Image (spheres, rainbow, N blue to C red):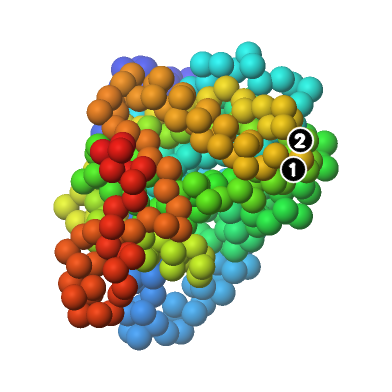
Amino acid sequence: MLLHRRPPSHSRSAVDKVVGALVRPWLYWLFHSWRLFGYFLVLPPALALKPLRTLLALAAYVVVHRQRWWQRAMHRLLGYGASQRHKILSPTAHLIRDDKRYLWCLHPHGVLADGWHSIIAKNLSSFENSGNGPPCIGRKIALCFAPIIQHVPVHQEMYRDKCGGADRRAIVKWWDSPDTDPALIPGGFAESVFANAACSNREYSYIKDRKGFMRICLEERKDIVPMYTFRVNWMYHNPGMLRGMRARFSQNYYVGLVFLCGWMGTSMPLTDDTTTVVFPPFEVTRYAVHQIHEAHAAYLEHLKRYFDQHKEEYGMKDTELCFIGNDFQDDDWAARALRRLGLISQHVTKVPESAQQNG
């Protein structure tokens, strides 16, 4: 009787390295291209050249995309290509109580929650019903971004059923569930406009005017756990012109006007060296329901305090965190040119005082 011998471990290791060297770069590109909607560049020529086959492929995706086997397979495949350099840490995990429910807030938005998405891609069970949430979180969370995420390729495969809208009803629904907390990005698409690797001395947080998430927590008596991804805004170049106007458009129409440019002009990032740090909880419940302005101001101080505390350790020593909002006023060449032509008014061509002070 012949016994099948397993190849030596060093042989398997060598084969794994060769396969990884040949396959992983392509999956790395595919992961970043598709999560940033690169397939929209392929669809028009595909429909023009092979309309029937393209429509059949789209129909097949519609049929299978919510099937768990498909989601897990795609998650595992794309996760193999995602970088392992993205890290998540929770140095004050002991302050997060198991018997309390929280709102988890991700900062900053980046182009599209880039560092966070890479971490989720590497952890298959992050949004499984049988799992225990993303790494270092210690509980299940659901992303309150937009209902359409449940059908967007690469995103829905990662987040499964634990994603939805960012309105009050969608957020409170998760607190009513037995074991899942809601999470959102307060800065929204407007904040994505300010993600730019060329702007390394300032980190813009577009939450100076955003108090809706604080109002919900005050009324529901829930505290907030902020998470900050350091260097995520340095993953892509993004033109710095007309940022204020673009941000206001993005906020009003829920579309991020971001013109990203990664490595060699592709969707591959300029860096994968990001670290997501879970900050200590912010005690919203110390404030009365009517104290929304005081609570919001204190939250900004809380966020800046821990950003400053960790920024040197994670490669952002000379970066200042600036809180901005709808009053951000452009002072770039395009804004000045439009002002001279009379197409925009004087009040949109000055840098806000807060940015000047932090700069």
User: Residue 273 at what x, y percent from top left?
Assistant: 31, 32
- Label 2 sits on residue: 288
Looking at the picture, which amino acid does disc 1 mark?
His
Between residues 262 and 75, which one lies in front from this camera angle?
262
Q: Residue at x 78, y 48 (%)?
A: 173
Left or right, 216 with respect to 60, comes to: right
Say few, some or many: other residues with alpha carbon within 10 Å of mark 2 (under 14 / 14 to 19 / 20 or more).
few
**333 over 129 or under it: above or below:** below
Of the pair 336 and 45, the residue shown nearer to us:
336
Q: Residue 99: horizontal and vertical position, in percent?
A: 79, 22
Location of residue 172 in the rendering, given as x and y in whole percent from the top left corner = 77, 47
As drawn, 354 above or below 342: above
Look at label 2 and name its amino acid: Ala
Q: Quadrant of residue 164?
A: bottom right
Image quarter in which the C terminus is found: top left
Q: Quadrant location of residue 43?
A: bottom left
Q: Which residue is mark 1?
A: 290
Q: Is residue 103 visible?
A: yes
Q: 254 and 21: which one is in front?
A: 254
Q: Is residue 149 left or right of residue 21?
A: right
- Residue at the image position 33 percent from the left and 84 percent from the top: 49
Indicate the position of residue 329 as horizontal and vertical percent values. 33, 59
Q: Does the CB distance between marks 1 and 2 fall below 8 Å?
A: yes
Describe the element under mark 2 as helix, strand or loop: loop
Evaluate whether residue 256 shows in this view: no
